[in-house]
Image (spheres, rainbow, N blue to C red):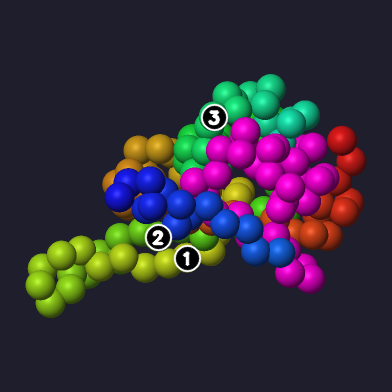
Amino acid sequence: MIGQNNQDYKYVMDNLTKIDLGAKYSYREIIDSQDISYKFRNICRQCFEKEVSPDTTLESHLYYLRPQDESFEVYTKLRTKVTVVMLSGRQQRDGSPQYRQEVMKVQELALLSPEEKKRRGLQIQEIEVSKLGLLSFVI
């Protein structure tokens, strides 16, 4: 069951202006996948593998991303946005916590410390890479 749940967040949606990637993808899976843009795979190979292990997921890399990291600059140049789910502060009728979905720029996400992310109950679901950012990015 855990494997199926993990697969729910491993997807690629490619449209005219952006590429959406599920946050459970590891960099190794991205590099090996033919469904993902060649240029993005090349950026992962040349830029991100210097900083993180190939088995690191997008979710954990972005969760611990800091503004001083080189990969922060890469994600900023790619005009990356991140879809997150966090606690809304309200409760449902049965008493369980209520969550809300939000799209954040990678700059906003990196400014939050891991402790603040944990306090807010933040979970990363997907990243959105701008095709214009991808087109203008020079390795």
Measured in 3D between alpha carbons, the distance from the residue under mark 3 to the one under mark 1, in whole angstroms, is: 26 Å
Which sits earlier in the primary sequence, circle 2 or circle 1? 2
Q: Amino acid at mark 1?
A: Glu
Disc 2 target residue: 85
The answer to whether 105 is drawn above or below residue 110 in the figure is below
Crowd tier of the residue under label 2, counting other residues whose Cα lies within 10 Å: few below 14, some 14–19, many 20 or above: some
The answer to whether 96 is drawn above or below residue 127 in the figure is below
Answer left or right for 28 relative to 118. Answer: right
The answer to whether 19 is drawn above or below residue 90 in the figure is above
Measured in 3D between alpha carbons, the distance from the residue under mark 3 to the one under mark 2, in whole angstroms, is: 23 Å
Answer left or right for 90 relative to 80. Answer: left
Answer left or right for 30 relative to 113. Answer: right
Q: Position of residue 74 (x, y in %)?
A: 73, 40
Q: Residue at position x 61%, y 48% from top?
A: 107
Callout in the foreground (3, 2): 3
Q: Residue at position x 62%, y 33% from top?
A: 28
Disc 3 target residue: 55
Q: Amino acid at mark 3?
A: Asp
Q: Position of residue 103 (x, y in %)?
A: 53, 64
Is residue 59 at all visible to an observer of this figure? yes
Which sits earlier in the primary sequence, circle 3 or circle 1? 3
Q: Element under label 1?
A: strand
Confirm whether the magenta stretch covers residue 36. Answer: yes
Q: Amino acid at mark 2?
A: Val
Q: Which residues are magenta?
A: 15-43
Crowd tier of the residue under label 1, counting other residues whose Cα lies within 10 Å: few below 14, some 14–19, many 20 or above: few
Callout in the foreground (3, 1): 3
Q: Which label belongs to residue 33?
A: none
In the rendered picture of this protein, how many numbered marks are placed on residues?
Answer: 3
The answer to whether 23 is drawn above or below residue 13 in the figure is above
Q: Which label belongs to residue 102?
A: 1
Crowd tier of the residue under label 3, counting other residues whose Cα lies within 10 Å: few below 14, some 14–19, many 20 or above: few
